[in-house]
Amino acid sequence: MLMVHRFNLIALLAAMLFMAGGCAVKPSGRIFVSERGSIDGERVTLWTIDNGQGVKACVMDYGATLVSLEVDGRRGETNDLVFGADGWQAGLNDNGTSGAITDGHPDFERRVWAGTPFNSTDGFGVRFRLTSPAGESGRPGRVDAEVDYVLTVEDELRIVMKATAQSATAMGMAHRGVWKLSDQDSVLVNGNRLKFDSNPPSNGNASEYFLYGDDAPLHLAATVHNASDDPVMSVWTNQPVLRMETTRVDDALSAVEFQTLSLAALPHSEVRRPDGLLVPGESYRHVVVYRLEPD
């Protein structure tokens, strides 16, 4: 019993004894927090989740945003896979916040969510909660949204988005994951390969893919390959659509945005299908997993 109490105390201290430094700190299997100024007069807080295996994820409460996903390389270097190391500032634009949670309206992306660190059998994480009052973004009733970021010891970043509504309303939450790509990288979706050395992307080049469905809880949406054609990262989801948008940054660097979506959340959808309607008593659940492949 004494060992159990001691373990609980250590876990609690790991979550509550915050240290300055944000994404720069290098703890082992813990969570650290730091403050990074304010946006629109509201304080912005960042949490660094370290899985103790050389991978660190930094998330912030503004927009429930993924700011960075850092991986230790073989030669001791640290590589950030997320486009925009300070995405909480550089990612702010007319199209929303890069790395943020969106529902097609600006209120999710441009609000400060309530963040709470936690640990589970899968790993350490941060849970964000937000209440959208009736009338906001045209919704007929209140919507309570929740997002979990969990970094596992298997080098997976799991994002679980949930919502409930007081009145029937259209719901389609998504994570706006924006990732760095070099000209030697490629993306594989449904057997189709997009290579950036021979076909450099233009800004705003977006495509939507209907994913091959199966009975598994999660199915593969996309795989990023390096110059040697080795998989670097794969994207998994429980949703049927992948929206991919590419942007040219400079002569050697591009960025790709992945959004996994329901059919009802497609930008050109004229009819709100039943899978996009959230009714009282039911819960919306959207899962996306970014799996880092072994180096």
Image (tube, rainbow, N blue to C red):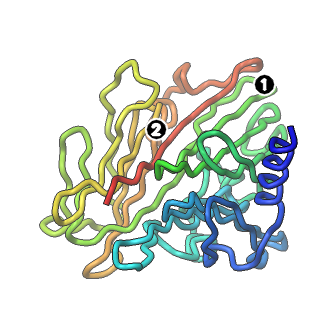
Question: Can you say which quadrant of the picture contains the C terminus?
Answer: bottom left
| Displayed quadrant of residue 122 | top right
Identify the residue shown where x is 32% and y is 70%: 254
- The three-letter amino acid code for the residue at tag 1 is Ser
Q: Is residue 8 left or right of residue 256?
A: right
- Would residue 96 be seen by someone viewing this image from the given angle? no
Residue 262, given in percent of the width and then of the height, sits at: 48, 32
Q: Is residue 129 above or below residue 167?
A: below
> Residue 30: x percent and y percent?
67, 60
Three-letter code, disc 2: Leu
Find numbered disc 2 in the image and state the secondary structure of the residue it sits on.
loop
Q: Are marks 1 and 2 in contact (CB under 8 Å)?
A: no
Tell me if residue 27 comes above or below residue 110 in the rendering. Answer: below
Q: Residue 281: x percent and y percent?
A: 76, 18
* Other residues around mark 1 within 10 Å, as few (<14) / some (14–19) / many (≥20): some
- How many labels were placed on the picture? 2
Looking at the image, is mark 1 or mark 2 earlier in the sequence?
Answer: 1
Rendered residue at 72%/23% (across/down): 168
Residue 202 in view in this figure: yes
Secondary structure under the numbered disc 1 in the rendered image: loop
The numbered disc on residue 167 is 1
Give the quadrant of the N terminus.
top right
Residue drawn where x is 42% and y is 51% of the image: 258
Determine the residue positioned at 75% across, 58% down: 111
Q: Alpha-carbon neighbours of circle 2 within 10 Å: few (<14), some, or many (≥20)?
A: some
Measured along the vertical axis of the image, is residue 180 above or below residue 271? below
Q: CA distance from mark 1 to mark 2?
A: 22 Å
Q: Nearer the viewer, residue 73 or 207?
A: 73
80 on left or right of 200: right
**Which residue is nearer to you in this view: 15 or 23?**
15
* Disc 2: which residue: 266
Left or right for 159, reference 210: right
